[in-house]
Image (cartoon, rainbow, N blue to C red):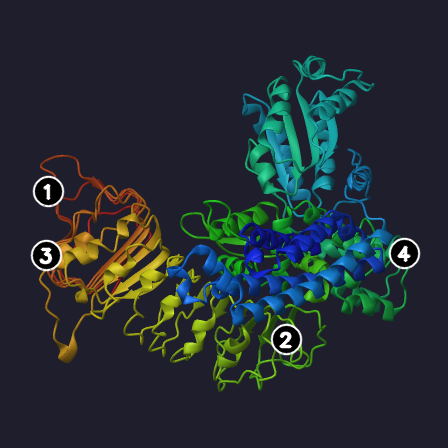
């Protein structure tokens, strides 16, 4: 993991050198030396990372390197913040010549002090890193670790022979695959490719062996071939091995042409089965080179692929991928018992009881059951079994066939950027539902990801989440209606892997008791399951360089607000999350947290933010969602120019926005904008902001002219997915505020074509705009029209191709959902609608003025309340009808 973080630091350092900020501050020479030293260390880090598990001296060397890297990262971060500001301290510089400005800036007292302190700190860290770089020589670390990969490949060689006495929990999987191979595969015109996907240690190879040796498979195929691929997807090597396996003799051909001809000659007119075991290659072109050579057998020929990577299965497979799930706890126990007790006729009841608790650590992963069972094979004392039961799996002895070394292969196959992002997930408890956006913002705050060219950092974070899912690091994925990942979990053993890699650097802790916390801890989550007496558990108070502090709390617990300890050191903190946790003040945090980039006070009773928050110049994410008592935001919030995500959804006590939001040019998320007639709070403040996700615009009755609404430029905000437009239902003294141009203003608020959810509340116009119901909104899935009392009829919604859910409520004059006349033509519409909610429509008579057989063909759920005149047509697709 040191390799991943050090590369982040090196990239930051080189960016500063490239911008010549070091030259401005007189520390360019030191920066150059640091860059060279870090590059030297980075070259051997992969070798060190892999050797540390067997060499304590290398492990300690990496710990010293990590400590120095974190300190250097703090220095560089402060430098990138302060240097540009100090460079412009002399206000007269813009009126003088460039040379004079540079000269005056260089000798400015504040600049001189900062430059002096920075140079000293850099020299100190440079000396430490220089010593660390020299120390590496005694470990004989190598820049290239190809020899190690060859040894791993040799050790992981597999064959078709089943190497265990009995296979547990895979009979159903085997039957499904065999049925396909000897049955459905015959329907494929070309060779069928059946991918088996699963976490490392799940038993993919064993299952493939189980299938390969099945009598029905042996009788069905004329030729069966088994190839262990691993990470060397060399097409010529694979063709040669297939030929040698099929012919039973060595293949002398070395070049592509004779290999292709020999292979096709061998497979021609034969129904063959090829198993490609343990595939890691995700290069489509390399796979195609092999695939099309193999497309020469007779009908029904098949290839079975085993892989840990869903991405590989997606590229290679011609059938739906076969996800290998965990086996039952009973099957895990049988596998564990087979290894732990061997052929013993008698099992000691006390050990059986403990053993069944040990099996719970396996999480249904067969290799874990086998390795833990093997560990217990020669242990017969109860205290030895209790030790294993009470220990974390990463603290137990590991050999090359244990579960963590098997999972480490997946980790070391990750690109460096993904390694850092993956292990960060150790900060969450096991079985925790991780919110994707929350995780991405935390990665951003810690500097693990950054923008690349035109690709925004959030987009990169999203791709990393997808990649980790495709590589089987995430599971139990929850997607929205459009197939976008929202939440996910980690398998317990994958969490164990992350914890094994990060050691004491990341900690999840129950906050109710004393915790033994290493001074090296950088990222902490505290879980409060009972009423707390202090915000930090014993053991955390004097941690020096905390970077992430997250609070998990049972929101049903009620307690008085707590005070942040005055002695708590926030000097290095990047992310602070106190969701559902009441604090008396956040000023002690802000006072010292110049590096803070992520701050969440969501679901707390905070009433206002201190003005000192404006000192957080690096702040990227400010989450105040559902702070129902929040009445005011700092007036000069627009000075936080690095702010990217401002979440004030559910802050209903907030009456107005701070002025000049348009100056937050980095802003990507603004969940609510409250229109006001104050200067700098008009709707056109949104004009230049590239907002995405969810946006609610409140108090639209205060928009002065349609042109002001047009300047909000909603139609150009292509990343906007959910839009809520609302007017106040009543003004002061219960009177509706006057406004002449209701319809024109709503017409000017046309959303972008990519919008998926639209809600309009308390609209005062008599008709809806032309764009609502327009074919331009092809992605609109959900529409809610609420309390639009003056509207005479609904817009033409029936032709929206993606509309699945429709809610109409509180309209006094509406008679039909679809008011159009068909003039004798066939009536069709609402072709995708599945759910309909209608209520408080006193004059609604029918769903459509002219009802036809092709209306609402997929409507399955209807909820109706307070629609006394409504009569429903025959709707055979409806499965759920609720009338109140």
* Comes first in the chain, label 4 or label 3: 4
* Comes first in the chain, label 1 or label 2: 2
Q: Residues within 10 Å of mark 4 (few under 14, many from 20)?
A: few
**Are the residues tagged 1 and 2 within 8 Å (C-beta)?**
no
Residue 392 coordinates in the image, percent (x, y): 75, 65
**Are the residues tagged 4 and 1 within 8 Å (C-beta)?**
no
Q: Nearer the viewer, mark 1 or mark 3?
A: 3
Q: Residues within 10 Å of mark 3 (few under 14, many from 20)?
A: some
**Residue bearing mark 2:** 510
**Are the residues tagged 1 and 3 within 8 Å (C-beta)?**
no
* Comes first in the chain, label 1 or label 3: 3
Looking at the image, residue 637 lies above or below residue 273:
below
Query: Relative to residue 792, is residue 254 drawn left or right?
Result: right
Q: Nearer the viewer, mark 4 or mark 3?
A: 3
**Which mark, by number, is residue 82?**
none
Looking at the image, residue 190 lies above or below residue 499:
above
> Considering the image in quadrants, where does the N terminus appear?
bottom right
Label 1 and label 2: CA atoms lie apart by 65 Å
Of 782 and 574, the residue lying toward us? 574
**Which mark, by number, is residue 344?**
4
**Residue bearing mark 1:** 821
């Amino acid at each position: 993991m040191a390799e991943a973080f050090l590369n982040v630091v090196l990239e930051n350092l080189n960016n500063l050198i490239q911008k010549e900020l070091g030259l401005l501050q007189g520390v360019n020479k030191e920066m150059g030396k640091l860059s060279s030293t870090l590059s030297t260390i980075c070259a051997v880090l992969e070798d060190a990372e892999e050797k540390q598990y067997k060499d304590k001296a290398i492990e300690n060397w990496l710990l010293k390197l990590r400590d120095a890297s974190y300190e250097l990262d703090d220095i560089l971060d402060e430098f990138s913040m302060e240097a540009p500001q100090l460079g412009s301290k002399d206000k007269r510089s813009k009126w003088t010549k460039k040379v004079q400005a540079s000269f005056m800036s260089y000798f400015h007292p504040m600049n001189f002090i900062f430059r002096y302190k920075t140079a000293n700190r850099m020299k100190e860290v440079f000396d430490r890193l220089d010593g660390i770089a020299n120390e590496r020589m005694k470990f004989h670390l190598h820049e290239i670790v190809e020899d190690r990969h060859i040894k791993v490949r040799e050790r992981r060689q597999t064959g078709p022979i089943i190497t265990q006495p009995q296979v547990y929990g895979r009979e159903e999987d085997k039957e499904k695959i065999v049925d396909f191979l000897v049955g459905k595969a015959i329907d494929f015109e070309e060779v069928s490719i059946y991918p088996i996907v699963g976490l490392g240690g799940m038993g993919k190879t064993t299952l493939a062996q189980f299938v390969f040796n099945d009598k029905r498979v042996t009788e069905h195929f004329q030729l069966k071939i088994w190839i262990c691929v691993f990470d060397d997807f060399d097409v010529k090597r694979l063709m040669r091995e297939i030929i040698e396996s099929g012919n039973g003799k060595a293949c002398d051909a070395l070049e592509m042409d004779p290999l292709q001809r020999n292979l096709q000659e061998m497979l021609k007119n034969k129904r063959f089965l090829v198993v490609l075991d343990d595939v890691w290659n995700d290069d489509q072109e390399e796979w195609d080179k092999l695939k099309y050579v193999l497309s020469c057998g007779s009908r029904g020929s098949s290839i079975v692929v085993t892989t840990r990577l869903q991405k590989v299965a997606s590229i290679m497979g011609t059938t739906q991928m076969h996800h290998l799930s965990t086996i039952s706890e009973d099957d895990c126990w049988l596998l564990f018992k087979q290894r732990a007790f061997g052929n013993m006729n008698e099992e000691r009841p006390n050990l059986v009881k403990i053993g069944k608790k040990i099996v719970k650590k396996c999480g249904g992963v067969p290799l874990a059951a086998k390795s833990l069972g093997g560990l217990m094979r020669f242990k017969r004392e109860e205290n030895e079994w209790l030790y294993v039961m009470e220990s974390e799996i990463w603290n137990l002895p590991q050999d090359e066939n244990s579960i963590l070394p098997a999972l480490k292969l997946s980790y070391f196959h990750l690109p460096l950027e993904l390694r850092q992002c993956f292990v960060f997930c150790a900060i969450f408890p096991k079985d925790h539902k991780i919110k994707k956006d929350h995780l991405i913002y935390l990665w951003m705050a810690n500097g693990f990801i950054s923008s690349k060219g035109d690709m925004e950092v959030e987009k990169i974070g999203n791709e990393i989440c997808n990649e980790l899912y495709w590589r089987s690091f995430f599971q139990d994925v929850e997607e929205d209606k459009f197939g976008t990942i929202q939440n996910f979990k980690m398998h317990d053993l994958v969490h164990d892997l992350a914890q094994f890699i990060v050691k004491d650097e990341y900690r999840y802790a129950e906050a109710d008791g004393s915790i033994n916390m290493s001074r090296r801890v950088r990222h902490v989550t505290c879980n409060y399951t009972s009423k707390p007496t202090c915000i930090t558990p014993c053991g955390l108070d004097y941690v020096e360089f905390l970077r992430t502090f997250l609070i998990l709390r049972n929101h049903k617990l009620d307690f008085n607000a707590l005070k942040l300890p005055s002695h708590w050191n926030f000097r290095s903190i990047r992310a602070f999350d106190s969701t559902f946790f009441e604090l008396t003040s956040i000023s002690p945090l802000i006072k010292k947290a110049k590096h803070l980039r992520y701050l969440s006070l969501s679901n707390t009773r905070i009433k206002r933010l201190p003005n000192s928050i404006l000192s957080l110049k690096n702040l990227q994410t400010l989450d105040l969602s559902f702070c129902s008592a929040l009445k005011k935001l700092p007036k000069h919030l627009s000075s936080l120019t690095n702010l990217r995500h401002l979440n004030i959804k559910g802050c209903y006590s907030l009456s107005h926005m701070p002025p000049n939001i348009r100056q937050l040019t980095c802003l990507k998320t603004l969940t609510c904008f409250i229109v006001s007639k104050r200067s700098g709070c008009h709707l056109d403040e949104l004009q230049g902001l590239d907002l995405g996700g969810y946006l609610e615009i409140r108090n639209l009755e205060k928009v002065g002219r349609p042109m002001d609404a047009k300047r909000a430029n909603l139609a150009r905000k292509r990343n906007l997915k959910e839009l809520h437009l609302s007017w106040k239902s009543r003004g002061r003294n219960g009177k509706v505020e006057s406004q002449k141009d209701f319809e024109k203003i709503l017409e000017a608020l046309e959303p972008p074509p990519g919008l998926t959810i639209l809600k309009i509340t308390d609209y005062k116009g008599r008709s809806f705009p032309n764009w609502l119901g327009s074919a331009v909104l092809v992605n609109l899935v959900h529409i809610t029209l609420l309390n639009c009392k003056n509207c005479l009829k609904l817009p033409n919604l029936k032709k929206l191709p993606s509309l699945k859910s429709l809610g109409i409520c509180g309209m006094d004059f509406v008679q039909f959902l679809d008011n159009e006349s068909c003039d004798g033509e066939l009536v069709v519409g609402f072709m995708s609608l599945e759910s309909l909610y209608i209520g408080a429509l006193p004059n609604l008579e029918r769903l459509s003025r002219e009802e036809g057989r092709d209306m609402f063909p997929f409507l399955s759920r209807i909820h109706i309340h307070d629609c006394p005149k409504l009569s429903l047509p025959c709707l055979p697709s409806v499965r759920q009808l609720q009338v109140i």
